[in-house]
Image (tube, rainbow, N blue to C red):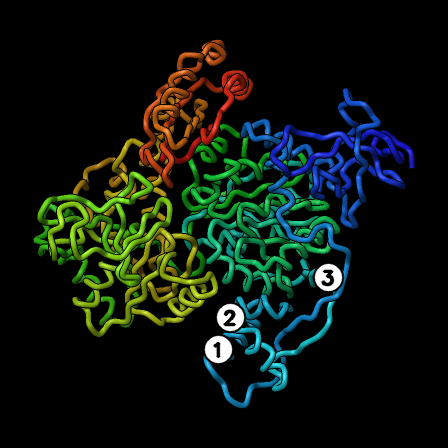
Amino acid sequence: MAGPDYFETGARVGVLTAQPLDGVLDYRAPEGGCRRGDFVEVPLGPRKVIGVVWGAAAGGFDPARLRQVLRVLDVAPMREELRLFLERAAEYTLTPLPLMLRLATRAPGLGDPPSMRRVYRPGPGRPGRMTDARARVIDAAAEHGGLAFTLHELARLAGVSPSVVKGLVASGALIEEDAPRDLPFPRLDPARPGKALTADQAAAAAALRTGIREGGYGTTLLKGVTGSGKTEVYLEAVAEALAQGRQALVLMPEIALTGEFLTRVEARFGARAAEWHSGVTMSERRRIWRMAGQGGVQLVVGARSALFLPFRDLGLVVVDEEHDGSYKQEEGVLYNARDMAVLRASICGARVVLASATPSLETWVNAEAGKYARLDLATRFGRALMPEMRAIDMRAQTMQAGRWISPALGAALEQRIEQGEQAMLFLNRRGYAPVTLCRACGQQVGCEDCDARMVEHRHLNRLMCHQCGATRPIPVICPSCGAEGRMAPVGPGVERLQEEAAALFPQARIATLSSDLFASARALKAAIESIAAGGADIVIGTQLVAKGHNFPLLTLVGVIDADLGLQGSDLRAAEHTFQLMRQVAGRAGRAERPGLALLQTFQPEHPVIRAILSGDEEGFWRAEAQARHAAGVPPFGRMAGIILSGKDLGAVMELGNRLARADGALREIGAEVYGPAPAPVARLRGRHRVRLLVRAAKGVPFQQALRRWIAPVRTKGDLRLAVDIDPQSFM
């Protein structure tokens, strides 16, 4: 079939691969020709790699020297809107286009032909003798909604040997069968009735439905207090998108949140949505990737990388908890999934819903300016009320040495336990203690490969670096002075807080939620479900507990150190503290029982603490916006971080100084360069890190100037340069 997007046999075509090379490569079209967007297999040196036909060849090569495309893959071609999205995302983030393509092809076996596989799924039988290993297999198979797994996938999920899985077939507890590798997902029914909505919810849902029916791009901030039922509202938007025959994507910041949400989706639509994140099996990732392109999956619930799936007709993107820092990819390709969701939707004519109780300042400002629509849910669902919030002035509390639960908070905890209610203690520090030092010489134990202190994890009996993951046994002898028996933990982490709570309340059932305490996402989900069902009296957790969990019996939240996030010079410190404290406090009083949030603070007069306690969210955002506007920083200015790294500190610093001096392209747009200076974590995994910060006014050609500025840099040896547009973290 002729046309500008069709290339006949032997025609010169440009193919983009995910290999770290300079852009598009020239090839000759295969027998039978190919079209723009086709996924193809091409020879590259001695290897065969997957690529996408990006367009006509650039030329400039002897046609006789060009190698031929080996074959066109039997998958849906990449649509023009996805190619355009990858190009614009690459331009915005200053990322090489092949690296962007890698994000869009993260599925194994894309070039494999359709085939059958032996799979296992839950059966009606029960084994004659139930063992712990068999129970784990049955639970793992049932947890994923009856999905079929290969032998090794199911064994790996359950943490058993393949023989345990095979042994359950004879009893009928598992069914073994042959199945095609990639099947469409069960159809969701958007006509099924959802939950009864309040007047506020119904009005918001109607507005979202109307926007989707009208078609075209638009972004809406769905701002609702914690417990107001934002999920039910945006599920109505999902239903409308599906009713229009379009696909929907719901992004979530934390894998552990997906379990409860997928159950709600299944109840609403009669079938389970596809789940995309790092914990999903490789074969399931391939199936979702293929079905997204063919239209064989209607709804995907996933982590930030799901944004790069090749949807055939994406009509809605929901970014739940849009303020969450987890949406920023901090390694490899540096991008913010919230911003990229808006970019992708604008290209493919989809709607975006940004849902949060405490939106990011960027989103709040866009809504204030009319760039985004805004819908508010001001009250909690049903008879639940927002929790009362009070400060505990730690300056007036008499504290024992090595204790962090104040008498006032302890009394409140005791009252809740006596009433049969749940209480939560929040401390945003993993492990047992953030510092281990020698009481003889004062030396703190640091990581050998990073400029970071090692954190004691008593349940592992090891010290751990939270920057690189390195561990070592907890020392008995000081590695600095050789003193024996003088090593001591300093400061609290959640494990130490658990120890203190157990000593104060020996009869209480205590559950600790921290990402490092669970071997798998499945185990974490099980712990969250147990707590929600009343399986604990006191819940101790890090920021993991702030992310959307619903614990009906929880009536008290105690924040151990409300001042922790106010330390340091991060321009978003106030915003992040405000968001985190309000989100954590929102876990209390989700049912009919009133909730109370107590914040232990040494600074009750601090403006951020006062704003948290008063609940004047709009006043806080106005004040924060005014301060940022005066400083010319995001969202009222542009920023980029340049991170230089290498094993030789002198070479890294020399490159930084050379860049700082050669800033002519930046001065042309009025930009300022700060640095070079050592990063806050100046050595990471044995590599020295130096940062430069570039600030410019809004509306200037920022990326163009940055590209011209760094273009002459040719890093040699192990020197590396990374660009972070709109940095969220300055570590």
Q: Disc 3 designates what residue?
A: 183
| Residue 314 versus residue 629 in the image, above or below | below
Q: Where residue 48 sits in the image (x, y, percent)?
A: 71, 44
In the rendered image, is residue 560 in sight?
yes
Say what amino acid the circle numbered 1 marks.
Ala
Q: Quadrant of residue 92?
A: top right
Could you tell me if the residues under marks 2 and 1 are in contact, i.e. CB atoms within 8 Å?
A: yes
Quadrant where the image shows the C terminus? top left
Distance from disc 2 to disc 1, alpha carbons, whole Å, reads 8 Å
Q: Is residue 151 left or right of residue 278?
A: right
Distance from disc 3 to disc 2, alpha carbons, whole Å, reads 24 Å
Q: Disc 1 or 3, which lies upstream in sequence?
A: 1
Q: Which sits in the foreground, 251 or 723?
A: 723
Q: Where residue 578 sits in the image (x, y, percent)?
A: 33, 41
Q: Disc 3 or 2, which lies upstream in sequence?
A: 2
Q: Which sits in the foreground, 196 or 653?
A: 653
Q: Residue furthest front?
A: 46
In the rendered image, is residue 388 in sight?
no
Q: Secondary structure at mark 2?
A: helix
Distance from disc 1 to disc 3, alpha carbons, whole Å, reads 29 Å
Q: Disc 2 or 1, which lies upstream in sequence?
A: 1
| Residue 630 versus residue 75 in the image, above or below | above
Q: Quadrant of residue 612?
A: top left
Q: Residue furthest right?
A: 1
Q: Disc 1 designates what residue?
A: 133
What's the residue at 34%, 24% (across, down)? 650
Q: Disc 2 designates what residue?
A: 158
